[in-house]
Image (cartoon, helix red, strand yellow):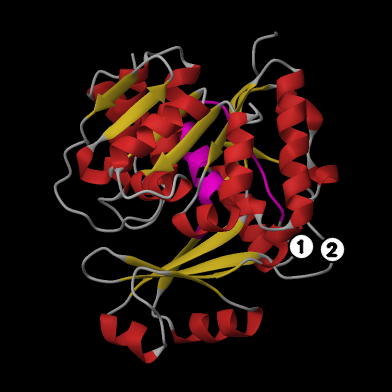
């Protein structure tokens, strides 16, 4: 196996995040369930966007956030995802490249518009998301750059991309290429609703070895094994997965293998401003650590630091270089 040109190649939905502050009255008036994520059509997306207050626009999507986090930590990151050749598609491409992430997936000339996630953040830091997936769902196997996959130490896939059949084929093609090159494949379970839809298929990906490393939070893990007992779910996970990372918010996080469980506490946070991207940035920290050859506990602490930083600001992209914070904390030399 040759040295990797990329530490992490993330594959997922290419979404432009539009973040705006909102009062709870706004959510009620527009029929939104606080803290939820609703999939909407293009007409609803236009209507909500028009009603929102001033906002910021940035390239987003779960896997893209992880790639940007790896770059902020000084790692070599790439991203594959589909946009349309439109205004927001241009915004996405410019923004993610500006974050230091290699991105070259060809934009679609026609079809649905570039995906966008309209995120309303209430004063308590809770995010309510309205997502139009558009062009992001049209990633196909032909969009997978085999050379890029072969060059990455880890190919990281987001569970959200398991919805469209063609994207599922792209996902599996990337995993096959990665393993053929002796690389590692990681999967984020993304959210509990995703797990509810594809529980059997996700379990098969894990048990079959198609996925080497699983990322999930406590809720997703319990959903995967259909139990309210966290410890029982961990026991089941240890039997099925080669490696897994389980995050538990203020309870910290664990690295789980068949041989052992390594746990660390959550990173201290002064205040929670916006939880957008916390799990994505945790994955970025852990992956950066593990691709640098750091031990599991240090990699978990790097993930906790990245997640703790991101929830203290608006948006899922670090406002200051995470590598500086990691050096200050003595996690990266």
What mark, if any, has residue 109 been given in the picture? 2
Q: Tell me residue 69's x, y (percent).
A: 45, 38
Query: Could you tell whether 244 is left or right of 116 in the image?
Result: left
Nearer to us in this view, 212 or 58: 212
Q: Does the magenta stretch include residue 77?
A: yes
Front in this rendered view, residue 18 or 66: 66
The picture places residue 218, in percent across and down from the top left corner, at 34, 45
Q: Are marks 1 and 2 in contact (CB under 8 Å)?
A: yes
Among all residues in the image, which is located at the extreme left? 270
Q: Quadrant of the C terminus?
A: top left
Determine which quarter of the picture holds residue 29: bottom left
Query: Circle 1 sits on which residue?
Result: 85
Label 1 neighbour load within 10 Å: few <14, some 14-19, many 20+: some
In the rendered image, residue 250, in percent from the top left (x then y), is placed at 21, 44
The quadrant of the image that shows the N terminus is: top right
Dot 1 or dot 2: first in sequence order is: 1
Is residue 60 visible in the rendered image? The answer is: no
Residue at 59% in and 30% down:
207
Q: Is residue 135 above or below residue 66?
A: below
């Amino acid at each position: 196996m040759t040295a990797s040109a990329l530490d992490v190649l993330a594959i997922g939905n290419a979404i432009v995040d539009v973040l705006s502050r909102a009062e709870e009255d706004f959510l009620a008036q527009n029929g939104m369930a606080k803290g939820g994520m609703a999939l909407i059509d293009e007409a609803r997306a236009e209507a909500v966007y028009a009603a929102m207050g001033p906002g910021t626009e940035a390239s987003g999507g779960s896997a893209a956030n992880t790639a940007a986090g790896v770059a902020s930590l000084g790692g070599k990151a790439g991203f594959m995802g589909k946009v349309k050749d439109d205004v927001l598609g241009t915004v996405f491409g410019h923004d993610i490249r500006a974050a230091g992430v290699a991105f070259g997936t060809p934009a679609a000339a026609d079809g649905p518009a570039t995906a966008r996630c309209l995120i309303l953040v209430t004063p308590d830091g809770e995010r309510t998301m309205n997502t139009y997936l558009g062009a992001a769902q049209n990633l196909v196997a032909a969009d997978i750059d085999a050379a890029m996959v072969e060059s990455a130490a880890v190919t990281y896939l987001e569970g959200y991309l398991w919805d469209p059949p063609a994207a599922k084929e792209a996902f599996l093609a990337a995993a096959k290429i990665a393993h053929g090159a002796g690389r590692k494949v990681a999967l984020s379970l993304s959210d509990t609703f995703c797990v509810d839809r594809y529980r059997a298929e996700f379990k098969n990906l894990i048990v079959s070895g198609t996925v080497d490393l699983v990322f999930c939070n406590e809720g997703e893990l319990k959903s995967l094994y259909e139990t309210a007992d966290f410890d029982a779910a961990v026991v089941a996970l240890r039997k099925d997965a080669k490696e897994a990372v389980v995050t538990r918010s203020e309870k910290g996080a664990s690295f789980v293998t068949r041989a052992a469980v390594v746990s660390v506490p959550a990173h201290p946070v002064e205040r929670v401003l916006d939880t957008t991207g916390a799990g994505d940035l945790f994955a970025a920290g852990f992956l950066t650590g593990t691709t640098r050859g750091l031990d599991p506990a240090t990699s978990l602490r790097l993930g906790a630091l990245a997640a703790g930083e991101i929830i203290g600001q608006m948006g899922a992209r670090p406002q200051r270089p995470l590598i500086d914070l990691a050096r200050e904390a003595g996690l990266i030399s």
